[in-house]
Image (cartoon, rainbow, N blue to C red):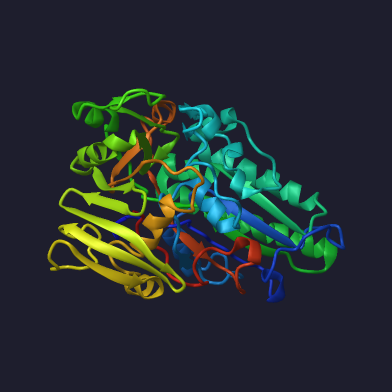
Amino acid sequence: MRKSRAFAAILMLMASLTASENAAGERLVGESSDGVPQRLVLALDGIPYDVFVELQQQGYFPGFRPAARMVSTFPSLSDVSFAAIGGSEPPRGYQQMRFDAAQNKVVGNTLGSLSSQAHPSVGEDSRSYSSLHRIIGYLAPYHVSLREMREIGREVLGSRKQTFVAYLESSDAVLHVEGRPAATKFLIELDDFLRELQAEVRARTGRELFVDIVSDHGSTMVKGRIVPVERLLRQCGFRRRDRIEDPHDVAYSLAGIIGSLAITTSREDAEEAARCLAAAEGVDLVAIGRDDAIAVLTADGEGEIRQARTAPEAYGYRVLRGDPLALMPGMPAATERIFDELSLFTQTLDAPRPDPLRRLWQAFHGDVREPSTILVSLADGREGAAHVVERTVEQSRHPAHRHAACRVGPAPFPQHMRHHRPEGEPCLRRHP
């Protein structure tokens, strides 16, 4: 959530290669009149905002508008982020591998979470790849990403849909394994690919192809150290299990390489578990979902968030100890203030924790259908990882997800791609 992280939010790079202003206003449905899609929405996994901007400054993607930053969800994980981008129904949990309260167990598995089918909110028309494909993508991410790119090109030219939505998942592995140089190289290849695709569409139809590029998150682009969450909780008397049967049982999943965790505990032990983690090295912030409030804990502060009103949107922030969100410096404990959401958003664009109240509130009230008890944000340079993924990239770079919502394009977001902020506003620098 701090400014030092890579841009938080869904790194939303919406881009266009066409001069048509009307094409971006809404998603085209049905079949294209000339047999070739009129619009391509290309969802890239894990491309940082600043890498794209740097390439635009060097002259790449010349037909695209400059990238604009947008605010994302917390936690900035693919399932939640893609749902926010597309305006689809919120996912049941923060990831496909999650704790299911009705079944009282962790459902899903690591291999399933590595498949593109694990992100149904994308709603792509392109092919879905298997878990094995994603694992191979971690072994040779750059070459696999180029192969996916070429496959998307064939699928677009073979489709009769007016709007074709494609998801290129291996770009995420490029960042995790090979870092910024490979991401730059990949985007340069993408620029060439889109030029060639545009030329082919022009030759077939005599018109331009409207292109949007969107990504669900960015990356720290540094190899992070693992935070031993399970050991930390064990030292505080908690036991990690797939089910919650005893008061000190905790349940959570680690799917992929991430900078946040969703932890389920018994309600009576949530506070104790949260305080245990908030004081630990490598933990940035811990949030607890209460009935009518969100508790926010850091190593040196504690506060509460409540929704004060919905029209216009406003939140109450109460300082209990220190000032964990740095919104009321120097104020005594038990001080509470009502913040107008739009004003706070503007005031915190370049703050260490931009737009924190709405994002934290929505994390437990709307972004997912079955929120966890506790959400943990890890510090920069720290991460949680599934063992199968950690082993795959053991000797490679594997920065944790940090998300940024950004847009490039000549016109407002199409209706189906609207996020919860107006076009052109800066991304978050860091997520809670």
* Figure check: 387 above or below 207: above
What residue do we see at 41% from left, 68% from top? 309
Count of marks overlaid on the render: 0
Quadrant location of the C terminus in the rendered image: bottom left
* Quadrant assignment for the N terminus: bottom left
Give the residue drawn at x 71%, y 47%: 125
In depth, the one of 11 and 188 nearer the eye is: 11
Q: Is residue 340 visible?
A: yes
Position of residue 35 measured from the top left corner of the image (x, y, whole percent): 86, 57
Q: Is residue 13 left or right of residue 262?
A: right
Residue 203, above or below 42:
below
Query: Residue 315, how many percent across, how many down?
Result: 35, 66
Where, by quadrant of the figure, is residue 54 drawn?
A: bottom left
**Residue at point 80% right, 51% down?**
159
Front-most of residues 351 and 38: 351
**In this view of the protein, which residue sits in the foreground, 374 or 379?**
374
Is residue 276 or residue 384 the one in the foreground? 276
- Decide if residue 397 is in sight here: no
How far across and down, in percent of the image, does residue 206 sit?
A: 83, 68
Q: x and y percent of residue 97 in the render?
A: 49, 33
In the image, 299: left or right of 35?
A: left
